[in-house]
Every structure is written in structure tokens, then in C-alpha cells.
Amino acid sequence: MSYLIVIPAYNPKSDLIEYVDTLIANGYRHILLVDDGSRDECRGIFDTITSKPGCTVLRHEINLGKGRALKDAMRYYLDTYTVNSRNIESPRGIITVDSDGQHTAQDVFKVASAMDEDPDTLVLGARDFDSDNVPSKSKFGNKCTIVALKLFIGGSISDTQTGLRGIPAEHIERFQGLPGDRFEYETRMLIDAIRSGVKIREVPIRTVYIDNNSETHFHPVIDSIKIYSVILGTFFRYMLSSLSSFLVDYGIFCALIYVLGQSDMNKGRSVWIATIISRICSSLFNYTVNKKIVFKSSRGMTTFVMYYVLCIAVMAASAALVSLIGTTGFPVQIAKIIVDTLLFIVSYRVQKQLIFKS
């Protein structure tokens, strides 16, 4: 097969030797293992694999994480093979495979076949999390990540944590330069692919969990925090921007009320003036922060017009929906909280994917 099989491994069992034998028997001639700081007792496993035809082992002296292992494998690919080589024997990309036996040789073949059909496509082996053999914590965690990615990043990916991935040669150099050394790196890869417009294709694979997934090196708390910080990082900045804009609005409003209160101006008129001026200032502040810091957009002044059209649309939608819900007898105070929360998320998606799109 004309793809480099990459297997990051940390303290693997001897079953890994048999698995590599199966891959070789199925025609895979380029296999790279990354020993990510495994115990000395595992050295014999890697030595045995190294002696097999077409097999190479990269070794980390200490555990650096799955993300680093994958990036080092990509660097090996870039340094070893010429992407534009006319040698048909040179691998045309990478297929990453987990070392715990979850990915069968037949599923690796599925990914390779999909890459043959769509050479420029990132291919993902997608598991079915509704299967009876999926541990409850894995099912819950994966489904939460799927929803979060779809809601805050975009794209519809049914298995965001799959380790079986087919990466075409043309995308390897960019993926190799992404930050992240552990499990969050795989999430960064998906986000980068979505934002860069890389075509993504999923192929169904067997859902295999050995011994209730007891061999996983995924730390539910630490690794989940890292993954969600990657997915929600922009949204958190968006929330802080909105909060700071509110403080600017409130601060200017209070200052103007104090200043205008020293004159003989009608109180109602001073409230209108303070409200308009403070809202203009806070919206300009919010626009600038969102453009430069939150979404880091380099687009021109069209974003300015689009931003204020969105502001007006959100304001009108809020008033209309709250009024509509109020006609049913539902308390408008509660309705406003619900409606404005939903519109807050909608506004985020519109700004991210349309107004300040890279």
C-alpha cells in the first residue's frame, strides 16, 4: 500500500507485534512506530518490530504525548519522502493508527481506499457511539465533544476523537506545524481543516473497545480540559469581549448621567442621551475587540457595516421574539433571558463564520 502507517505507542502490549504482522500481511510496506517514552520492558517489542521489513521506530526518551508523536512522524515523512516524487513506491500520505488494537486492518484498508478515491481529502474512520459495547463515559464524552465542535467551530463530524485518520501529503506540512503535544492536537487538526476548507470525509469503522477501554492513556479531566480549551477558546474570548463591552457601556452611562445631572436638563432626556452615547462607544469597542482579538480578522471595512447590521437584526429579533412569547402568558422577564442567550450564540456564529471569517 502506498501510504505510511503511523502508530504512536506508549507502553504497548506484545499484541502490537501481531498487529504489525497483520498490516504487513495485508500489503502495507511502510510502517512507522513512535515509541513515546515507553518503559524499558517494552524495548523488546519495538526491537522485534524494527527487524521486520518496511518497519521503522522513532524513539522518545520520555513521554511527550500523542500529539508530539504524530508531529514527529509527520516530520519524518517530510524529511524522508519527496511529496512530488514520481516514484510510485513512495507513500502518498499518512494513515495514523492507534496501538491498542482498536483499528482493524480491514478498517485501515477502508481509509486507504477512501484516500485513493479522494486524494486531497482528510479521511476519518468514524465509530458508532450508539453501539452497545461503547463504555458509558466514552459515549458521553465523545458525544459532548461532537456537539461542542459543531456548535462553536462548525462542520459536522461524527467522531472527533478517532485516531484512525488518512492525511494526504499536501496537508502534512501544515498539520505538522500546529500547536499541541497531547490529545488536544488531534482536535486542533480538525479545527484547522474545517477553517481552512479542507474536504473531510468519514468512513464507518468497527467500534472496538478492549477491556472496557482500560488501556487508554487519555486522562478524562486534564485532557478534556485541554480539548475544550481548544474548541471553546474563541468563544471564551467572545464572552470576555461582551462582558468588557457591557462594563464600558455601563461606565460611560453612569459618568454621563452624573455629568448631565449637574445641569438643568430633563432627567428623561439625559437618560436617552447617556444611553445612546454609551451604546455607540461600547459597540465600537466591541467591534474592535472582536475583529482584532477575538476572531483576529484581517478583512476590511465591510465588516463594520455587517457588524452593525447584525446588531440591529439581533435587537429586532430579541424584541419580536420576547413579545411573541409574552402573548402566550409566559413571563417576558424569563423569555428575554432565554431569547437573548440563544441570540448571543447565534451572533457568535454569524460573526465567526460570516463577518470576521478568515
Image (tube, rainbow, N blue to C red):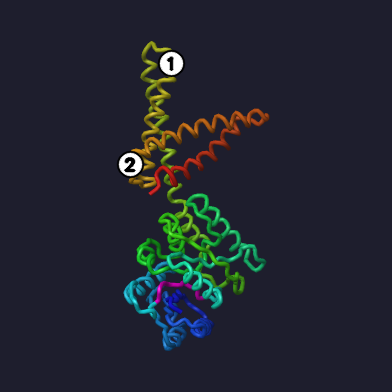
Position of residue 318 measured from the top left corner of the image (x, y, whole percent): 54, 32
Query: Was residue 101 drawn as part of the magenta stretch in this picture?
Result: no
In this view, the residue in front, 116 or 233, is 116
Query: Which residue bears the numbered disc 2?
Result: 300
Position of residue 315 measured from the top left corner of the image (x, y, whole percent): 50, 31
Answer with left or right where residue 282 lies relative to residue 227: left
Position of residue 282 measured from the top left corner of the image (x, y, whole percent): 39, 32
Can the viewer see residue 14? no
Q: Which amino acid, mark 2? A: Gly
Q: Which amino acid, mark 1? A: Arg
Identify the residue at image location x=40%, y=65%.
181
Label 1 or label 2, whichever lies nearer to me, is: 2
Query: Which residue bears the numbered disc 1?
Result: 269
Answer with left or right where residue 287 lies relative to residue 218: left
Q: Is residue 41 above or below residue 347?
A: below
Q: Residues within 10 Å of mark 1 (few under 14, many from 20)?
A: few
Answer with left or right where residue 37 lies relative to residue 155: left
Q: Which mark is residue 20?
A: none
Q: Is residue 212 above or below residue 224?
A: below
Query: Which quarter of the figure has residue 292?
Result: top left
Q: Earlier in the sequence, mark 1 or mark 2?
A: 1
In this view, the residue in front, 190 or 100, is 190
Position of residue 38 measured from the top left corner of the image (x, y, whole percent): 44, 77
Secondary structure beneath dot 1 equals helix
Identify the residue at image location x=48%, y=40%.
347
Query: Was residue 95 drawn as part of the magenta stretch in this picture?
Result: yes
Answer with left or right where residue 131 lies relative to residue 55: right
Q: Is residue 59 above or below residue 338?
A: below
Q: Which residues are magenta?
A: 91-99
| Residue contact at pointers 1 and 2, CB within 8 angstroms | no
Q: How many marks?
A: 2
